[in-house]
Image: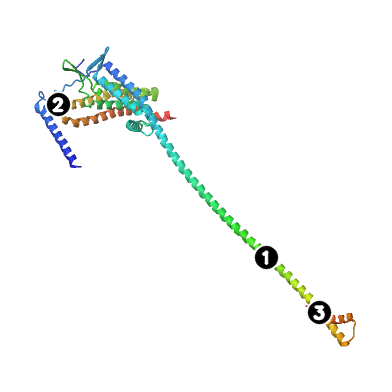
Amino acid sequence: MSSRNKRLLLLVGLALVALVVVGFVEGAIFKGPEDAFLSEPHVALPAEQIASLGAFRVTNTLLSSWITTVLLIVLFFLATRRMSPVPRGLQNVVELAVEALYNFVISVAGEHYARRFFPLIATLFFFVMVNAWLGLLPIYQSLAIFENGHVKAHLLRPAGTDINMTFALALISFVFIEAWGFRAHGFAFLGEFIRVKVLFRDFPRNLFMGLIDVFVGILELLSHFVRIISFGFRLFGNMTAGEILLLVSAFLVAFVATLPFYGLELLVGFVQALIFAGLTLVFATVAVAGTESEEHH
Amino acid sequence: MPEEGLGFHLPSLIAYGINFLLLVGILYVVGYKRILKMLDERQSRIRESLETADRVRQEAAQQQQELQRQLEAARQEGQQMMAQARESADRFRQEEQERAGEAVAQMLTRARAEIQQERDAAVEEVRRHFADLAIRAAERVVERSIDRDAHRQVIERVLEESGDLKR
């Protein structure tokens, strides 16, 4: 490294240290919550309304999800507009992501079901991840609608922090899983939940085992519905906690001290997307399990 | 707008759901379908080109083998032809030699016969001269003419008895 670069690095390092010190001095830890550089974070779980279409209220999280949607569509459109066998630029990036994800789907669900599952799984992954990452853009959550000099509502907020969005995805995931299971097994799929076969096979003798089997069926049914709740709250909780973590860390120590948490949130966004898509994929694979060999011939 | 609670709101939930399903559909048409098709195409193209390479390699090996075989055959043919040529040359030479030998022998025989003939003729001539000479000498001696023919017979008989000059 040349001495000039060394000097530059030293300068940047000093500036960072100075920013940390100033941030610490300006932060809530040093000055107390009243005089801190940033005002005390106010956690509001419901999304804020920013506009209304007739009776329908448009929230900042919904707008955010639209932006994510449009961004994804534009990205894929640009990437696949002029496809060439030798991928270049954007096509290469998107293709890489799609191929990696597709191989992941194949590794879990097998070649046969991969094509059927892939669109939902991939969209879940891309949507959740891009949504989370967009929220980390510096200006993203600073945009606001002002009224009389006060913040009336923030314009954008990552859609993952809106419980309606996470539950919408959870419900869609649930419906698709059950539909695929039903399509693969037919009415036999319901036999997973209504387990009366043992109970009625020479009736009074198997009473105990039969009742246990019925109970197992009910548990199975319950577990499928519990997935909606776990899906919905997992994503919501992670995204919301991440936002709060960033806010609070910035409140406690202003400026650069938040950076590590930004890095962490990048990872969380990726991991949560992978978990949501991966679990959906696994549940779907389980739902159609045992049918591949019959459908192949 | 509710500030408390989690903020469940059914119309929003439905809106998110519709939004997401639309996104799935559009991304499928715009993105996944094309990309997966491209991946398939690339895969098949790679497989094809690998197969083609294999086939070409095999063909090349086959061709080389064929070439080798042809070369071998040509060499064998050449050797055969050479052997044939040598054989026919040998045979020709032998025939020529035989023919030449025969001609020489013939010529020799003819020459010998001619020589014999000449010699016979010469001997005959000498004998005739000698007989004439002997008769003339005898005529001189007896001073009278004798029966030439009878005399000649006598001489002939003498000559025949001596036999040396004839052969």
In front: label 1 or label 2: 1
> Mark 1 near mark 3, Cβ–Cβ under 8 Å?
no
Exactly how many numbered labels are in the figure? 3
Which picture quadrant has residue A36?
A: top left
Secondary element type, mark 2: helix
Q: Are marks 1 and 2 on the same chain?
A: no
- Residue A172 visible (yes or no): yes
What is the CA distance from the residue labelled 3 to the residue labelled 2? 169 Å
In front: label 3 or label 2: 3
Which residue is denoted by mark 1 in the rendering?
B100
- Residue A202 visible (yes or no): no
Amino acid type at circle 3 is: Arg
B53 displayed left or right of A16: right
What is the CA distance from the residue labelled 1 to the residue labelled 3? 39 Å
Q: Are marks 1 and 3 on the same chain?
A: yes
Amino acid type at circle 2 is: Phe
Position in image of residue A118 (x %, y %): 35, 28
B17 displayed left or right of B144: left
In front: label 1 or label 3: 3
Which residue is denoted by mark 2 in the rendering?
A251
Amino acid type at circle 1 is: Ala
Q: Chain of mark 2?
A: A
Residue B127: which disc? 3
**Quadrant where the C terminus of chain A is found in the figure:** top left
Position in image of residue A32 (x %, y %): 9, 25
> Mark 1 near mark 2, Cβ–Cβ under 8 Å?
no
Q: Is residue A174 or residue A266 the one in the foreground?
A: A266
Q: Are marks 3 and 2 on the same chain?
A: no
Secondary element type, mark 3: helix
